[in-house]
Image (spheres, rainbow, N blue to C red):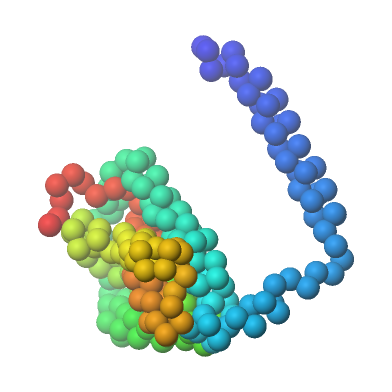
Amino acid sequence: MVIERYRPFTVMVAVVVVTVSTLLLVWAIGSLPPESPGLSAQVSANLINSGVQAEVTAVLLNFRGYDTLLEVSVLLTALLGVWYLGPFHITSDTPVSGLVMDNMVRFLTPVMILVTGYVLWLGSHAAGGAFQAGALLAGAGVLVQVVRPEWLALRDSRTFRGLLIAGPAVFVLVAAGMMLLSGSMLEYPREHAGSLILLIEAASTLSIAAILTMLFTGGRPHPGAGN
């Protein structure tokens, strides 16, 4: 076969690429200065204009918001890649239920949702934010799907699919609005920076949670399923 014929060449190219990449990485790390002041001083000096009190949130959602927009988009792209592999199939019709598991879902899920909101709000002045909150909310989604597989039907609804693009969509809308008002993408006015960041993080939390939950399940929804 043609594939077998070119396999040694493919392996050789792969080895060369990996070797060269490793050597370049080692050289790049070795050429770094022993001490670097970084940009912490600039971040601290401009923190008052960011709309938040947490330096990490200020960098991710204000100073380098474009990078975070791409990160959320990468998650969505990863899910689309999983969907491309094939449709979703339920591997077992037997739910992992019982008194303990049912009570766990009943009591833990509301608590995890409340903690998600707290972690999201915490990001404005301490460690927290959309990615941490989204991962926590996704944990609740995974727990529900494991114990109550009949809820998998929700993943085919248009509302749930809308959550997948909520984060990137709000991010892009805010960026477009800033372009029209100030001519600079994702450069928020100081008096509205905090509110805009909270809006973006809230939408991104829902998208991250929905994407991670569906990545756990795997497979794309069946065509025409759900409304």
Q: Left or right? Give the position of 24 relative to 204.
A: right
Q: How many marks?
A: 0
20 over 82 or under it: above or below? above
143 over 120 or under it: above or below? above
> Which quarter of the figure has residue 20?
top right
Residue 199 visible in image: yes
Q: Left or right? Give the position of 217 relative to 60.
A: left
Residue found at x 30% / y 84%: 110
> Which quarter of the figure has residue 84?
top left
Q: Position of residue 50 (x, y in %)?
A: 52, 80
Residue found at x 63% / y 78%: 43
| Quadrant containing the C terminus in the rendered view | bottom left
Nearest to the observer: residue 165 or residue 13 = 165
Residue found at x 76% / y 48%: 25
Q: Where is residue 18 in the image (x, y as percent from the top left)?
A: 71, 37
Q: Position of residue 128 (x, y in %)?
A: 50, 80
Residue 174 visible in image: no
Residue found at x 34% / y 81%: 113
Nearest to the observer: residue 195 or residue 28 = 195
Q: Where is residue 165 in the image (x, y as percent from the top left)?
A: 31, 59
